[in-house]
Image (cartoon, rainbow, N blue to C red):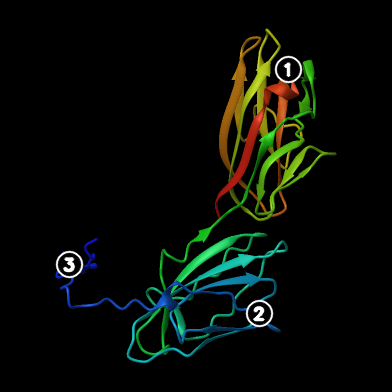
């Protein structure tokens, strides 16, 4: 087999290295480092190129960069992972500045939230720039599932009642469901999207589902989302986006009509996700 020579980008064009040339790629660039926070102190070792993943199980009160090489462009990424409590903060040193010279962006505060931030320095760490839009939180805050066996029958639920759920397919980021009150509590303030589909209606005189925010019995005048069908054996679907304050909750409320559900049909599929801080 003929040996294959590396292809590199040079002068705006892709070129193949000469047969007598080599391409030295340090293996350390692929290294993942997972430093721990000790009594609030966190040191990121930049003596060899690497990416970092930091479990935020306490506040970082003293962040340092160790072994920063001089005369080199150093680019690195830090993935901050909040614990189940959330709300952990990072006290960036004065050397860290956001693009434009402003204050650096904090990791997302939500429970179990994941934030990926990129940093750059070309002066040995005298100034460490936090990439502007790149310091964006990946807000993994979502809960999804279906009615399951929370109610069954034909009809199994009649107005006026909150829709219950007991089968959950995904739950990341701290949204909690309280079965006794049929409420979904959010972990932090922000903009949320609630969706539900496949609700099988049984009333021939109209069926209406409303979304309530901090409201157990929303009405046509104060709901945050609505799905409606006029007849029997039709499917209700809705999607709505709205703000929820810290400590707030969301409900799906059957305001009119009645619903059928069988466990085997997987009807009433829902999701709630945070879409903006």
Determine whether label 3 and label 1 are within 8 Å by CB: no
| Image height of 229 relative to 65, above or below | above
Residue furthest toward the front?
1
Question: Residue placed at 61% from the left, 65% from the top?
Answer: 81
Say which quarter of the image contains residue 111. Answer: bottom right
- Badge 1 crowding class, 10 Å Cα cut-off, few under 14, some 14 to 19, many 20 or more, is many
Circles 2 and 3: CB atoms closer than 8 Å = no
CB under 8 Å between discs 1 and 2: no
- Left or right, residue 17 beside residue 227: left
Residue appearing at x 75%, y 34% in the figure: 165
Q: Which residue does the numbered mark 2 point to in the structure image?
A: 37
**Who's the residue at 68% across and 26% down the image?**
266
Please provide percent x and percent y for residue 15.
16, 66
Q: Position of residue 147 (x, y in %)?
A: 73, 30
Camera-near label (2 vs 3) is: 3
Q: Which mark is residue 16?
A: 3
Mark 1 or 2: in front is: 2
Lower position in the chain sequence, tag 3 or tag 1: 3
Nearer to us in this view, 104 or 82: 82
- In the rendered image, the vertical position of residue 143 relative to residue 122, given as above or below: above
Identify the secondary structure beneath mark 2.
loop
Residue of label 1: 260
């Amino acid at each position: 087999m003929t040996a294959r020579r590396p292809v590199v980008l040079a002068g705006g064009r892709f070129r193949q290295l000469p047969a007598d040339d080599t391409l030295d790629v340090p293996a350390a660039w692929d290294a993942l480092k997972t430093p721990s926070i000790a009594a609030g102190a966190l040191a990121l070792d930049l003596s060899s190129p690497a990416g970092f993943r930091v479990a935020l199980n306490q506040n970082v009160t003293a962040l340092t960069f160790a072994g920063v090489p001089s005369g080199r462009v150093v680019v690195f990424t830090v993935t901050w992972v909040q614990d189940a409590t959330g709300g952990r903060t990072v006290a960036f040193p004065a050397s860290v500045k956001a693009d434009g010279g402003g204050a650096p962006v904090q990791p997302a505060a939500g429970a179990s939230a994941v934030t990926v931030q990129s940093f750059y320095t070309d002066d040995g760490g005298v100034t460490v720039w936090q990439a502007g839009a790149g310091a964006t939180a990946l807000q993994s805050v979502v809960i999804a599932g279906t009615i399951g066996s929370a109610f069954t029958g034909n009809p199994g639920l009649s107005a006026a009642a909150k829709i219950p759920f007991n089968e959950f397919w995904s739950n990341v980021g701290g949204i909690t469901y309280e079965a006794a009150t049929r409420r979904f509590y959010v972990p932090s303030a922000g903009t949320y999207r609630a969706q539900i589909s496949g609700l099988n209606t049984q009333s021939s005189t109209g069926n209406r589902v409303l979304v309530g925010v901090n409201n157990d019995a929303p009405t046509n005048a104060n709901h945050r989302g609505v799905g409606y069908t006029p007849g029997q054996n039709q499917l209700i679907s809705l999607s709505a986006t709205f703000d929820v304050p810290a400590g707030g909750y969301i409900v799906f409320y059957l305001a009119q009509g009645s619903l059928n559900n069988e466990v085997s049909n997987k009807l009433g599929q829902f999701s709630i996700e945070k879409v903006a801080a």
